[in-house]
Image (cartoon, rainbow, N blue to C red):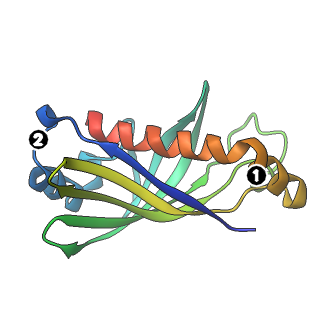
């Protein structure tokens, strides 16, 4: 059951820079904007760490080509899947979701913001979908917000 992640919006503090400079950075090399630590794994492929609460997990992240939807918005496709670790007791697909969506920067009269929108599939079949509906959906939103915060800190 694929779930829509409501758009997660993070205002960018004025001291970080203007929307145009943030859009320029986002349209460039992902090494310059993906949250630290980002390790290149191939063309448009990265390994990054995501956090949800006290938990951190490495994910394989793919980054697509940037596109504009107007003068004030720039978007880039981003997706990730959990990476296996030696301590894993069960297959990751049974425990952690993958994500497919877009990261973007937009500006308006109120300022500049980073946005993450997309879909994910809760793991665990029917039981996982029920857990997602009651609690884990909030964890997905927190993870998305921390991903954006990592970009802002760069």
Furthest-right residue in this view: 127
Image position, residue 151 (x, y; %): 32, 42
- SS type, badge 2: loop
Quarter holding the C terminus is: top left
Q: Residue at x 63, y 42 (%)?
A: 138
Q: Residue at x 34, y 46 (%)?
A: 34
Q: How many marks?
A: 2
Circle number at residue 89: none
Q: Residue at x 60, y 46 (%)?
A: 140
Circle number at residue 17: 2
Q: Nearer the viewer, residue 143 or 70?
A: 70
Labels 2 and 1 touching (C-beta < 8 A): no
Name above or below for residue 52 compared with residue 18.
above
Q: Who comes first in sequence, dot 2 or dot 1?
A: 2
Residue that numbered label 1 is attached to: 133
| Circle nearer the viewer, 2 or 1 | 1
Q: Residues within 10 Å of mark 1 (few under 14, many from 20)?
A: few
Q: Nearer the viewer, residue 6 or 30?
A: 6
On screen, residue 40 versus residue 117, left or right, reads left
Image position, residue 149 (x, y; %): 37, 37
On screen, residue 26 versus residue 41, left or right, reads left
Q: Residues within 10 Å of mark 2 (few under 14, many from 20)?
A: few
Quadrant of residue 147 in the image? top left
Image position, residue 139 (x, y; %): 63, 40
Quarter holding the N terminus is: bottom right
- SS type, badge 1: helix
On screen, residue 66 versus residue 132, left or right, reads left
Distance (Cα) linking label 2 and label 1? 37 Å
Q: Nearer the viewer, residue 86 or 22?
A: 22
Furthest-top residue in this view: 54
On screen, residue 83 versus residue 145, left or right, reads right
Name above or below for residue 125 compared with residue 13.
below
């Amino acid at each position: 059951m694929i779930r829509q992640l409501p758009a997660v919006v993070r205002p960018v503090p004025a001291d970080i820079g203007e929307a145009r400079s943030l859009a320029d950075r986002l349209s460039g090399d992902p090494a310059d904007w993906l949250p630290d630590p980002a390790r290149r794994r191939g063309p448009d492929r990265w390994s990054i760490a995501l956090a949800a609460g006290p938990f951190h997990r490495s994910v394989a992240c793919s980054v697509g080509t940037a596109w504009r939807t107007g003068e004030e918005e720039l978007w880039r496709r981003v997706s990730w899947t959990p990476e296996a670790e030696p301590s894993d007791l069960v297959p990751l697909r049974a425990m952690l979701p993958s994500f497919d969506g877009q990261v973007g920067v937009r500006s308006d009269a109120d300022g500049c913001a980073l946005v993450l929108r997309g879909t994910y599939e809760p793991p665990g079949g029917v039981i996982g979908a029920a857990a997602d509906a009651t609690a884990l959906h909030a964890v997905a939103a927190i993870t998305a917000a921390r991903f954006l915060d990592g970009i802002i800190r760069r």
